[in-house]
Structures are given as structure tokens and as C-alpha cells.
Image (cartoon, rainbow, N blue to C red):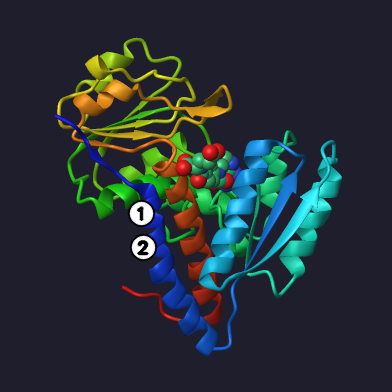
């Protein structure tokens, strides 16, 4: 068996077309969505991600503003920029690129929750816990959207999430257990005694541990869907969490790069457009 490729790049392109039409509808109502990003320091990966976000915005007609702060910036300096973006009417949504090396809780808590496109403000994460509508964190909701677009069923599925970080594992567990997804979720992490015993039972495995090749073919049930969220690097190239031979066992597999990463960008754009629609009282498509 060779797994069907869950092509995040292709879905990103499709979603850009869909979102461009919604941005055009907003423009008719006199609204231009505006995304701002805050980047602290010069980490090459973070710099690339932020650059990609601005390019994506330009492609669908969203204006964007960069606030690049030098490495070694203080927490107070970052919070002052957050305060400025909270006040600016031309900025309908913004994010602080992570990691900053500073107190993430203090930074995330300072963002106006109605402009929080990352869905990581404690109020928005609390809304997810309490099943209230709020922007959802981009990578986990990107995983769910990718599976939906390839008709991989989640209703009643056994899903194993490997990793319990703030931006992927933890919110993904919450999203997948909503009634709308209705999956049964097992959260695995560095304290899990027998990871393979869990993954072998799973219909869907989401590997977000940041440990290269932690998921090997013997750990995957034949036909399962496997999503690789790992972004460790080896010789400058991405070394994902999923061993390449998993393609011979899995039914569906994300490439990495080209799988979940582009979906993170797609869902950010969706959150930007949705925030602008909400602010303008424009009904989003059903
Ligand atoms: N404020 C946030 N910080 C971070 C988030 C986030 O959602 N919000 N997620 C990640 C980084 N990230 C977005 O910010 C991100 C990761 C990966 C990609 C992507 O398209 N990757 C490409 C490969 C690029 C490469 O070669 O390095 C791919 O997978 O094809 C986009 C965005 C952490 N920080």
C-alpha cells in the first residue's frame, strides 16, 4: 500500500481562492481586513513563517503590517507594541510569532481577544474548553480541516495525539472531542509508557512531538491517517516526526514539508477573514 498524500499545499491554494472571494465581498461593504505580526529576534524559521504570512495576505487582498523587534527586546517593549496594535483601527487581527523567549502568557493575555487570530488568548482557549465560538489555534484546526477535505472520518474515530504543547497537542485534543468532530482522543507525551501500544490502535495519528522519526511503520495500523507536525531540523532540512516508510502502511499521510505547515497558514487567513466579517457584521458562508 502507498498512502494517499494529504496535500496541504494544494488545500492552501484552494482555500486562498475561497477566501479571496470573501475578502472581495468585504471590500464591497467597505471593509479591508488588516493583519499585523510581531516578530521578536531573527530566528530563520520564525522569519520565514512571518514572511510567508505576509505573502499569503497580499495574495488574497488582506493588508498586512510587520512589527519586527530586535533580539533581546524586553517584555515591556513587546507589550507596548501589543498595546499599540490593540488600539489601531486598521489592524483587525494580529499575532505575536512564537517562540519569543519571553513570558508567553503575559504576551498572549495582553492581546485584545477580538483581534487574536491565533486563538491562543486565555479567553479564546477558555471559550474552546467551554464550547463557545471563538477563533481556533491555526495548526490544530488546520489538521482537522485537512482531514475533512480528504473525507477522512473523525466521527467515532480513535485519534492519538503525540505531544501536549500549547500551539498543537493540547488544543487539538479539545477540538477533536467537540460534538462536531466527535473523535475519541488519547493524548500521548514524554510520560507515555508504551507509545506504540496506543498508536497501533489509532485510526488517526497526529505526531507533534518534535522528535525525528518517532513514528515508525510498525507503530501504525494499516490504512490509518498519519499527520506529521514535526519541525525539527537535520542539516537545515525539516526532519519530521514520521519515518518515511510509514507511507507503506498508512492509508493517508501528510508530506513534511507540504502538509500541516501550509494548513497553519490557510487557517490563519481564514481566522483573519472571519474576524473582519464578525467586526463588520457580514455573515460568513455556511
Ligand atoms: N504565533 C504563532 N506562532 C507559531 C505558530 C502559530 O500558529 N502562531 N505555529 C508555528 C509556526 N508556524 C506559524 O506561525 C508555521 C509553521 C510552518 C509553516 C509552513 O508552511 N511550513 C512549511 C515548511 C517551511 C520550511 O521549510 O521551514 C511546510 O510545512 O511546508 C507555516 C507556519 C510556531 N509558531
Q: Quadrant of the N terminus?
A: top left
Query: Badge 2, how many Cα within 10 Å: few under 14, some, many 20+?
Result: few
Which residue is at a point 55% across and 73% down the rendered structure image? 61
Q: Is residue 165 visible?
A: yes
How far, Cα to Cα, is label 2 from label 1? Answer: 6 Å
Task: Look at mark 2 in the image and give the residue it sits on.
Answer: 14
**Quadrant where ligand 1 appears:** top right
Q: Is residue 246 above or below residue 153?
A: above
Q: Is residue 286 above or below residue 54?
A: below
Toward the top, the furthest residue is: 193
Q: What's the mark number on residue 262?
A: none
The secondary element bearing badge 1 is classed as helix
Res 280 → quadrant: bottom right
Instruction: Give the residue at mark 1.
Output: 10
Residue 30 placement (x, y as % from top left) = 58, 88
- Mark 2 touches mark 1? (CB < 8 Å): yes
Viewer-proximal residue among 84 and 208:
208
Amino acid at each position: 500500500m502507498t498512502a494517499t498524500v494529504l496535500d496541504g499545499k494544494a488545500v492552501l491554494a484552494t482555500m486562498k481562492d475561497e477566501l479571496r472571494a470573501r475578502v472581495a465581498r468585504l471590500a464591497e461593504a467597505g471593509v479591508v481586513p488588516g493583519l499585523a505580526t510581531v516578530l521578536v529576534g531573527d530566528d530563520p524559521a520564525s522569519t520565514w513563517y512571518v514572511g510567508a504570512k505576509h505573502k499569503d495576505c497580499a495574495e488574497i487582498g488582506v493588508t498586512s503590517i510587520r512589527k519586527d523587534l530586535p533580539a533581546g527586546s524586553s517584555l515591556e517593549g513587546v507589550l507596548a507594541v501589543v498595546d499599540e496594535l490593540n488600539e489601531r483601527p486598521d489592524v483587525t487581527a494580529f499575532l505575536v510569532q512564537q517562540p519569543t523567549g519571553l513570558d508567553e502568557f503575559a504576551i498572549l493575555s495582553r492581546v485584545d481577544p477580538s483581534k487574536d487570530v491565533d486563538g491562543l488568548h486565555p479567553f479564546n482557549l477558555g471559550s474552546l474548553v467551554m464550547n463557545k465560538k471563538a477563533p481556533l489555534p491555526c495548526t490544530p484546526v488546520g489538521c482537522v480541516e485537512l482531514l475533512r477535505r480528504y473525507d477522512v472520518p473523525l466521527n467515532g474515530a480513535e485519534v492519538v495525539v503525540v505531544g501536549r504543547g500549547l500551539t498543537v497537542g493540547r488544543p487539538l485534543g479539545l477540538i477533536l472531542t467537540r460534538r462536531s468532530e466527535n473523535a475519541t482522543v488519547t493524548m500521548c507525551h514524554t510520560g507515555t509508557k508504551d507509545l506504540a501500544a496506543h498508536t497501533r490502535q489509532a485510526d488517526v495519528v497526529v505526531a507533534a512531538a518534535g522528535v525525528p522519526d518517532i513514528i515508525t511503520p510498525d507503530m501504525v495500523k494499516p490504512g490509518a491517517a498519519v499527520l506529521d507536525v514535526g519541525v525539527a531540523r537535520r542539516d537545515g532540512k525539516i526532519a519530521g516526526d514520521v519515518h518515511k516508510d510509514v507511507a507503506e502502511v498508512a492509508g493517508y499521510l501528510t508530506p513534511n514539508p507540504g502538509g500541516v505547515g501550509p494548513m497553519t497558514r490557510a487557517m490563519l487567513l481564514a481566522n483573519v477573514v472571519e474576524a473582519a466579517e464578525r467586526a463588520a457584521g457580514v455573515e460568513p458562508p455556511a
